[in-house]
Image: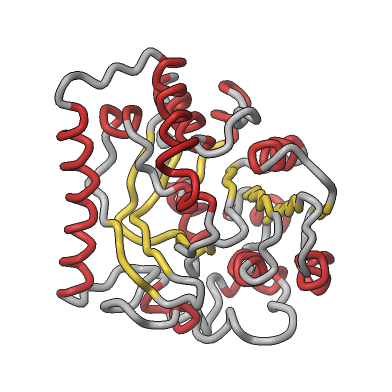
Amino acid sequence: MLLVTTMTRFPKISIVTPSYNQAKYVPWTVRSVLLQRYPNLEYVVMDGGSKDDTVEVLKPYVGRLAHFQSARDKGQSDAIKQGFARCTGDVMAYLNSDDMLAPGALHWVADFFRRHPDVDAVYSHRVTVDGQNRAKWYWVLPPHSDWYQTRWDLIPQETCFWRRRLFDAHGSVDDTLRFAIDYDLFARYMLKGAKFVRADRFLGVFREHEDAKTSQLLNTVGAAEVAKVRERYGIALGRLAPLVSARFYYGALRNGERFAHERRRLPGCLPGVGYDYDTVWGGLLDEPGLPPAAAEAADEGIIRRAAASVTS
């Protein structure tokens, strides 16, 4: 009976983290997942044979993972695809090895899907931090629109969770892509009729640093792959597409600037910018030692020390 109750309240959530030479950031990534203390978590970390200290810094956490490997692969999309092939969860996501989850994200996602059985995928606004975990800026998005989100790569991937039924029906990531991995996956799901919802909160954290793949590839490989995805699915933009895209993108940035200036607050952030995101986590991200065991969380809910005011 206890097992059935736990499975009902806490559907299995599978998360894959692809990693390569991210020893500086990946401990924060892994801790942000394990510190959720979600009692039905399947966490897979796929390292591409890193040449830095990634394997060493992850050693303390390997026993908490459903699977860990460090072996040469064909790149990020291949690592994600291999990881998903090992997953059995009812809810799925992938989290890059320099990004993080917000406190309470997994409990909130599980409860949201329980309360909204018609919704196939959920994502949130974006909070961006720098290499030292300092909050830099926000991207505050309007309610979800299939029209916009199938035409432009605008869903904050690190915040997006989807039901396994999409994966089973419409497939995994395209392992030939290097940049538009999430855009291809989400556009495919939406074009097949999946219902996406934008949550009014922050579920994940995007890291902006000079070595990030997004920064390096956005205007070269990224642009070409986004165009390839549009062609693949017959997505037409129209003559005014650059203006429409800019209005959406910069509108989300302006909303974020107002959000920060007015020192507003939503679950997953603190007022303003410049704060250490570890503060949102109640100091747990930077603590030495292993996170508490998830088994204790079934009756406790979200971690007490992770500031209840930002996890509601």
26 or 116, nearer to the observer: 26
Query: In the rendered view, would you say 129 is above or below 165?
Result: below
Q: Quadrant of residue 284?
A: bottom right
Whether residue 45 is visible to the viewer of this picture, yes or no, is: yes
220 or 16, nearer to the observer: 220
The quadrant of the rendering that contains the C terminus is: bottom left
Whether residue 114 is visible to the viewer of this picture, yes or no, is: no
Q: Position of residue 139 (x, y in %)?
A: 29, 57
Left or right of 152 on screen, residue 226: right
Query: In the rendered view, would you say 73 is above or below 64?
Result: above
287 or 175, nearer to the observer: 175
Q: Position of residue 138 (x, y in %)?
A: 30, 63
Residue at 27 percent across and 32 percent down: it is 148
Q: Position of residue 251 (x, y in %)?
A: 17, 50
Residue at 56 percent across and 22 percent down: it is 170
Query: In the rendered view, would you say 176 is above or below 213?
Result: above
Residue at 50 percent across and 72 percent down: it is 131
